[in-house]
Image (tube, rainbow, N blue to C red):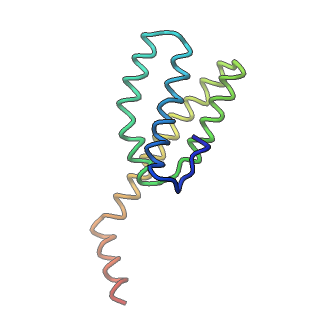
Amino acid sequence: MEQLKPDAGNYMQKWLRGNYEFHASLIASSRREHVARYAAMLRDTVEPYIRVEMQITGDVEEAEREHREIFDAFACGDAARLAAVSRKHVESTAERLLESLKRLEDANSPRAAKAHRRQTKK
């Protein structure tokens, strides 16, 4: 995903696919079919929200940094660190989405629209 160029065509689709494959590969390495099925179900549930967050912010730098941390912990076999950085990744993804939705809601509020009209009249 890090090799993708943000100005390339269908960047978002490619990044989302890479994100899906990254997480699926890590989970598959456990060789626990039940866990993999459950994780796939969760991924399928949250992916639309990840897509929304990405469309609003267009920013994946923090997610990519977290992916590197996850991969490094995985590659070192550090289960405790892997659990911690994975939790951080889930929580920060949720925070980014909620903050983005709040900013979007504030920008589209009647008060914001009224202020924008006043500024464009000047």
Residue at the spot 36% in from the left edge and 64% down from the top edge: 107
Outermost residue toward the front in this view:
9
Image quadrant where residue 46 sits:
top left
Foreground residue among 34 and 108: 34
Outermost residue toward the left in this view:
110
**Does residue 98 appear to the left or right of 85 in the view shown?**
left
Give above or below for 118 relative to 62: below
- Give the quarter of the figure containing the N terminus: top right
Q: Give how far across and how far down residue 4 sits, in percent.
A: 57, 46
Total numbered circles = 0
Give above or below for 85 relative to 3: above
Outermost residue toward the bottom in this view:
122
Foreground residue among 74 and 110: 74
Give above or below for 19 relative to 100: above
Image quadrant where residue 79 sits:
top right
- Give the quarter of the figure containing the C terminus: bottom left
**Does residue 50 appear to the left or right of 66 in the view shown?**
left
Residue at the spot 61% in from the left edge and 30% down from the top edge: 85
Q: Give how far across and how far down residue 116 sits, in percent.
A: 35, 77
Residue at the spot 57% in from the left edge and 34% down from the top edge: 88
Q: Give how far across and how far down residue 118 sits, in percent.
A: 33, 83
Q: Give how far across and how far down residue 47 sits, in percent.
A: 39, 36
Residue at the spot 40% in from the left edge and 44% down from the top edge: 51
